[in-house]
Amino acid sequence: MSGPKRTGTYSQRPLNLAPAVGDGSKPRTPVTWGIIPAFCAGGARAVILVEDASGFSRKHGRCVATIGKFDGVHLGHQLILDQLKGQAREKDLPALAIVIEPHPEEFFAGSGGDCPARLMDKQEKLRLLEEYGVDFCFVLRFDAEMSRMSAEDYIRGILVEGLGVAALIAGEDFRFGHRRTGDFALLERKGGECDFSVHRTLTREVEGMRVSSTLVRQKLAQGDFAMAEKFLGRPFSIRGTVARGEQLGAKLGFPTCNIELTHRRIPLHGIYACMVKTPRGEYPAAVSIGYRPTVTDSGKPVLEAHLLDFEGQLYGKTIEVVFRQKIREEEKFASTDELQRQIAADVERIRRVFADAAF
C-alpha cells in the first residue's frame, strides 16, 4: 500500500514528536485536532503535521480507523494495531489511529481531582504508534465542547464527514458522546446508515489475564516489573529531557539527572533500581520518583536519577529510564544527614541488584 500523499494544507516540515535518546531538542506539540501522518524516518518518511482535520477525507479519501486512549501501547493495543493494518491492507486504504487526549477521566477530574495514573504522555504514545506502522494518528482533543457533543454528531461529524471512515475497529465496551450515550450498538446501526463497517477489537491474554492498561498499572504499583514487561512487550520506561534542579543531590554527594513529570498522576512512587540510556551509553542508576518530603513540600512529583559511575552532566539531553526493581518506599527523614546515609545504602543495594541479576 502506498503512503499517504503530501497534498493540500500539509506542512512540509517534519514534526519532532519525541526526540531520540540524547537529542537535546524539544518536541513540538501537535496542533489541536491535527492529523499526524506517522511517516517513519530513514526511508524518506517523516512525521508531518496536518493542521486541518476537516479536510482529511477530501484529500485522502476514506480510511480504516480504530479509536482509544492507547495508554501504554501494550500487547493488547499492538494486537488491535495489527488488526487495523490488516483491515487497511484488505481495503487498500490508509490505517488511522484516533488517540483521545487528554484522557476523559483527566478532563472530568480537573486540576486537583483523582484519576487513573498515566503510563505515558501523548508524545510517547505517538512515537510508539509511529513505530508500530500506523499511517495516520488523529489526536482527538477531549475538552468541554467534546464532552457535550451528542453521540450522533460524534459519528457524523468526526468519523464520517471528517475522517471518511470506511471501517471502524472499536471495543465492545467503547462509550462516547454526551453522558456516554454512544455505544457499540449505535456504531453498528449508524454504520449501516452511513456506509461504514464496525468490527470488535481483538483481545490478548498473557498467563490467563486479559492485557489492559489497568492491569499494567496494577503490576507497576506492586513493583512487579517482570509481569508489566510481559504485558507491555517491552520493559517499562520513562523518557524525558534532563532539567536543572536545585543541586541538592550533588551537595549530598549523589548528583542526579532530573526529569519533570508531566503526567497528572504516575503509576510509580518510591526508590528504584533502573538502567538509564544516555547519549554516552547505558548506566545502572538509583532512581527516586516522588515529592522529596525531606527537602520540599511543593506537591510536584520529580524523577531523580543518580547514575552509578557516571561523570559529567546531561542537561538538555533526552534520557530513557528503564525500571527493573523497586527498592523501597519514599520516606521523610529527620535531617539531610539521615537522608544522605539512606541514599548511600540505597546505592550499595542497587549495585548488588545489578551484580546479581541478569536483566
Image (cartoon, rainbow, N blue to C red):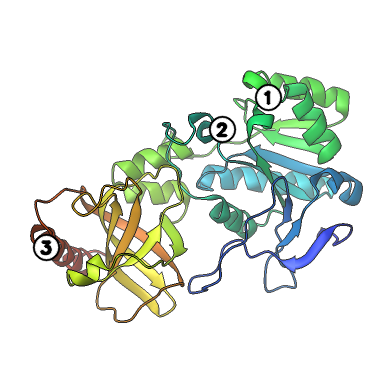
The N terminus: image quadrant: bottom right
Q: Position of residue 164 (x, y in %)?
A: 84, 40
How many marks are shown on the rendered structure? 3
Mark 1 neighbour density, 10 Å: few (under 14) some (14–19) many (20 or more): few
How far apart marks 2 and 1 lie (CA) works out to 12 Å
Q: Is residue 196 left or right of residue 257?
A: right
Q: Nearer the viewer, mark 2 or mark 3?
A: 2
Mark 3 neighbour density, 10 Å: few (under 14) some (14–19) many (20 or more): few
- Dot 1 or dot 3: first in sequence order is 1
Determine the secondary structure under disc 2.
helix
- Dot 2 or dot 1: first in sequence order is 2
Res. 104 mark: 2
- Amino acid marked by disc 1: Arg
- Amino acid marked by disc 2: Pro
How far apart marks 1 and 3 lie (CA) works out to 53 Å
Res. 238 mark: none
Q: Position of residue 49 (x, y in %)?
A: 74, 58
Find disc 3 in the rendering and name its residue.
345
40 relative to 96, above or below: below
Quarter assignment of residue 163: top right
Q: Nearer the viewer, residue 258 or 123?
A: 258
Find disc 1 in the rendering and name its residue.
148
Q: Position of residue 135 (x, y in %)?
A: 73, 55
Q: Nearer the viewer, residue 336 or 202?
A: 336
The C terminus: image quadrant: bottom left
Q: Is residue 220 left or right of residue 45?
A: left
Determine the secondary structure under disc 1.
helix
Determine the secondary structure under disc 3.
helix
